[in-house]
Image (spheres, rainbow, N blue to C red):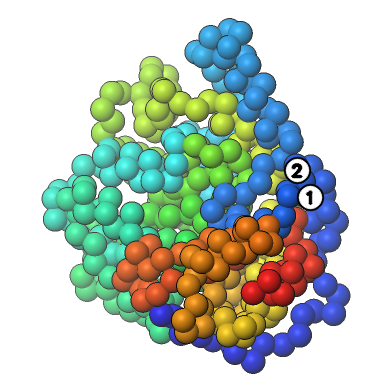
Amino acid sequence: MFPVTDPDHGALPSGGLPSEDLGAAWRSVRPRPPGIHLDSAASSRQSHRALEAAAHHARHEAELGGYVAEATADHLLQQGRSVLGGLVGMAAADVAFVESAQAALAALLGGWRLPAGSRVACLPGEYAPNVAQLRAAGLRPEPLPVDGLGRADLDGVARLLATDPPRFVHLTHVGSHRGLLQPAREVSDLCRAAGVPLVLDAAQSLGHVDVDLGADVVYGTSRKWLAGPRGVGMLFARPAIAAELVPVLPEPEGEPPLRAFESGEAHVAGRVGLVVALGEHLAAGPDRVRARLAALGRATRELLDGVAGWRVVEPAAEPTATTTLRPPEGTDVVETRTRLLTEHGIVLSAIGPERAPGEMTGPVLRVSPHLDATLEDLEALAAAL
């Protein structure tokens, strides 16, 4: 299991969480949950407007036909590509809509067609499905140097890039099995200086932490911290990388090259809902969103570490909203998750070691509140544990 840090946590800030108005506003525009939702790292709760926009487009498909309805939404979808590109420091032409983060990685690897056996450096604690996709593409994952926490060791990364550079570096910005933030900006700078592309898995970081970090390729999903619909993902690639990608069919005439990687048989209603969710994210203010999420993560760790023998994995001040808890000896994590849901209406995730077998040796309970969570919600979880 991971090392436990900051065991002597302090009291919660006397002023409470920052931007309480933002939390209240986020809460007010969503369906009221029957319990306490603390599972945004799995799937966030959509707003009424995002739900209604997706439903409205689905009705248009029934009235006009799917492709006619999609054509009427083209301008809105292009706005969405522009906003998404801005979040990662790219342009609308650099964005392709797909079905999920995993679909985005598959599209990238299928189009890049790198020589079999090409080396790819990634974290020892890499998400297992990512490793599986790299190997299925004929690539050879090798470990990036990390410190004792599993965070990329920048000196070690610099030495690797200087002495034995891989074909590209794949970095998962925030893992799904713990809320550790990787130094992606610094890794990006090192990769750029070495002429090695950086591919950033932002499935857990888009809408959560800053992702405008200079990566050559980014991929992510709608359903987590952006609070959009399920079934929508995004692939971002800068022009130099897009020029290396070979699609099965060429892009439509007059369209950017990356558009060839968008699937035609698409959940367009979900893409429309995501664009509305993006507008809500921008209206909330990405900097304020990140600050409140980080504060929620710290509050969660300070409240829960040591409760009934559960121990927090992350450093207390880690600037993410995701907290993972190591169980006391003899406690079944899956049973605990089920008990919290059925007896207390608290939604969390149980994470097994198969998710990151290079780093995990046992299961953890994952807590991932979004902006609408309150200190009372976290206190209720502590009491239930």
Query: Could you tell me residue 117's position as x and y percent?
Result: 14, 55
Q: Residue at x 69, y 62 (%)?
A: 344
- Circle 1 SS class: helix
Query: Could you tell me residue 101's position as x and y percent?
Result: 43, 46
Q: Are marks 1 and 2 in contact (CB under 8 Å)?
A: yes
Q: Which residue is mark 2?
A: 30
Query: Could you tell me residue 86's position as x and y percent?
Result: 58, 44
Location of residue 367 (image quadrant): bottom right
Q: Which residue is mark 1?
A: 27
Q: Which mark is residue 241?
A: none
Residue type indicated by callout 1: Arg
Q: Residue at x 54, y 17 (%)?
A: 70
The reply to whether residue 191 is visible in this rendering is no
Please state if 220 lies on the left or on the right of 142 as rendered: right
Q: Please tell me whether residue 156 is drawn above or below residue 192 in the rendered image.
A: below
Q: Residue at x 38, y 19 (%)?
A: 252
The quarter of the rendered structure image containing the C terminus is bottom right
Please state if 168 lies on the left or on the right of 56 as rendered: left
Residue type indicated by callout 2: Arg
- Circle 2 SS class: loop
